[in-house]
Structures are given as structure tokens and as C-alpha cells.
Image (cartoon, helix red, strand yellow):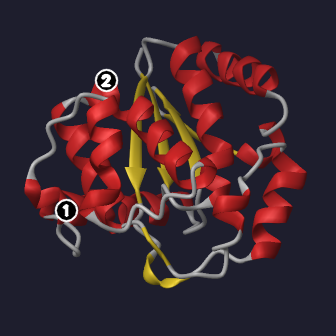
Amino acid sequence: MSSELYFIYDSHCPWSYAATPLVVALDEAFPEMEVNAWHCANYDGGNSVGFNTIKTVEKISGVTFSQEYIRFADSPKNSIISANLLTWIATKQSDKLLPVLQAIQYAHFVEGNSLGKKIDFNELAEDLKLSIPNKVFKEELSKDATFTLSDISDLQEFMGTAAFPALLLVHNDNAVLLNHAEYLNDVEALIADVNKQLKA
């Protein structure tokens, strides 16, 4: 009996920030379940989040955003380096992926760090004791991150939606798209529902 969780997200997406604690909770509740967290690199420097989106996420999920982040809500976001870094972590040290994602999200949404250039990652790398290769800091997606986008595209076709964040639970021959929005304020309900799926 095997089970996997697929999490499609963007490190700079407020909804992904709200959904990440759900993934962390599932990872802790079901240690035997493999978690595949795939960065979709939606923010490429040409699009912004917008103040209204931030306020909606706060209202529905209960997560909060700092003033340092909010005042740049309408500025273009670029998650390319974060996508490269998180894909590299997933390949080299997968056990650190969720903690690094959480640290990146904290730096971005709480500390207001844009994470758009190499220098923005210095403190994070030092705190997490990461020896990050220079290829991660290029301004275009790495080969590995590009391969991940291909995997995401295949999975989105299977799911029938390109919306993200997305949580797909695969258990044996069954696949269930979890409606993360229902659980943003009720992690225990999510764990209970996943437990039912795994026992079915």
C-alpha cells in the first residue's frame, strides 16, 4: 500500500503560503506518505499579487502578511530563483524541502524580502546551513525546474485543472484532489479526511 501527496505551489503566491501549513501537517501526521512539492514558477517578474488578493487570503485563511510585504503588493514578483532553489533542495536534500519552503515564505511574506536576486538569499542560506550552488541564482529556470514544470503540466492535465495551489492525494490506484480551501482553518478535518481515504 503506497500513498503520495502532490503539492503544486508557487513560493510567492499568497494562497500557496496559506496552504503550506496543511502540507506540513499531513507530512507530520503521515510520515510514511511521500510528499512531492512542485514549484510552478508562476511569478516570472511580469506579474504582481495585488492588495485585494492579499486581503482575501487573510480573511479566508487567517494567515497574516506584514506591512513590509503588503506595501509592495502591486510590484511585480519573481519566484524564479526560489523555484530553482527549491527544486535543487527536492533533488539533493528532500527532507529539508518543506522547512526551506517555510523559511522562504517567512522571508517573503513576513520580512518583506523580494527574493529576486542572489544577495536576498544570503541570510536564509546561513540560517539553514545551505551550501547553494551558483546555478540556482540564474535569472532563468534551471534544467531541473523546467523538468518539474513538465511534470506539473502532465499532472494538471490528469487533474483537469491548472489552478494552484493544488493538493492531490494518490493512494494505491485512487487519486483524490483535495479542496485545500475547505481546510485552511481546520487542519484536523483535513487529517481526518485523508486518514479515511488511506483506509478506504
Residue 72, position as x, y percentages in the image: 63, 74
Q: Residues within 10 Å of mark 2 (few under 14, many from 20)?
A: few
Q: Secondary structure at mark 1?
A: helix
Please indicate whether residue 67 sits to the left or right of residue 56 in the image. Answer: left
The mark lying in front, picked from 1 and 2, is 1
In terms of image quadrants, where is residue 151?
Answer: bottom left
What amino acid is labelled 2 in the image? Answer: Asp
Residue 153, position as x, y percentages in the image: 38, 67
In terms of image quadrants, where is residue 2?
Answer: top left
What amino acid is labelled 1 in the image? Answer: Phe
- Provide the residue designation for mark 2: 95
Q: Earlier in the sequence, mark 1 or mark 2?
A: 2
Please give the name of the residue rendered at 26% of the width and 50% of the height, measured from the top-left corner.
85
Cα distance in 3D space between marks 1 and 2: 22 Å
Q: Residue furthest left?
A: 134
Tag on residue 137? 1
Count the numbered circles shown. Answer: 2
Please indicate whether residue 42 sits to the left or right of residue 200 in the image. Answer: left
